[in-house]
Amino acid sequence: MRSYQIYWIGEEFAHYFYGREQNFFQLFFESSTSQKSEKNVVEKQIQYITKEFSLRSLASILKEALMDKESFAVDKNNCFTIELPEKKGKAVLSAEEKCLHLKAKGSYEAETVFFSSLKKLNACLFAVDFESKNYGWLEPIKKENLFK
């Protein structure tokens, strides 16, 4: 099973660290593996660079984008599920204030549907998969061209 954590990075940090995403990965990784004394400092850094998700906006965007899919469901705890026909794949998205959790198995199609829908929420969403050490922006951040 694949597991992702998705963070909303503040725009100023997203632009500053564009191209150096390894720094974000390292910070989030340290948060999950640090000892208690170090973890407190790391958690404060994460709180500073991330923004809170509006659960109402998240639910609205996902429902609007996915309600036409017969494999889409929402439970009372705001867990969103996509289950592909013939058990080809399944993805479940749950939300906390500062982090979304996406768990997927089978085909990559279900998680891709979530990723493409979440792009509409904000361009500064950063996904991390600690198990396979994959990370990146859901939508590439466009750099301003300062020289013409």
Image (cartoon, rainbow, N blue to C red):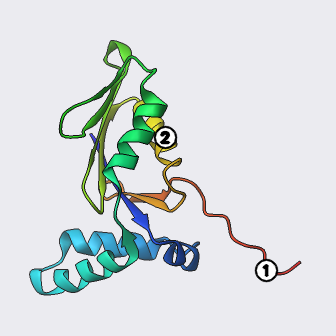
At 31% from the left and 70% from the top, the residue drawn is: 28
User: In the rendered structure, which amino acid carries the disc numbered 1?
Assistant: Leu
Tell me residue 53's x, y (percent).
35, 58
Dot label at residue 62? none
* Residue lying farthest to the left in this orientation: 36
Tell me residue 22's x, y (percent).
46, 72
Quarter of the image that includes the C terminus: bottom right
Mark 2 vs 1, N-terminal side: 2
Q: Is residue 28 above or below residue 68?
A: below
Q: Are marks 2 and 1 in contact (CB under 8 Å)?
A: no
Tell me residue 60's x, y (percent).
40, 40
Residue 108: quadrant of the picture: top left
Left or right position of 19 against 24: right
Residue 51: quadrant of the picture: bottom left
Tell me residue 61's x, y (percent).
45, 41
Q: Is residue 74 above or below residue 30?
A: above
Dot label at residue 117? 2
At 24% from the left and 38% from the top, the residue drawn is: 79
* Residue lying farthest to the top in this orientation: 86
Q: Is residue 98 above or below residue 114?
A: below
Left or right position of 142 against 139: right
User: In the rendered structure, which amino acid carries the disc numbered 2?
Assistant: Ser
Residue 8: quadrant of the picture: bottom left
- Nearer the observer, 124 or 59: 59
* Residue of label 1: 146
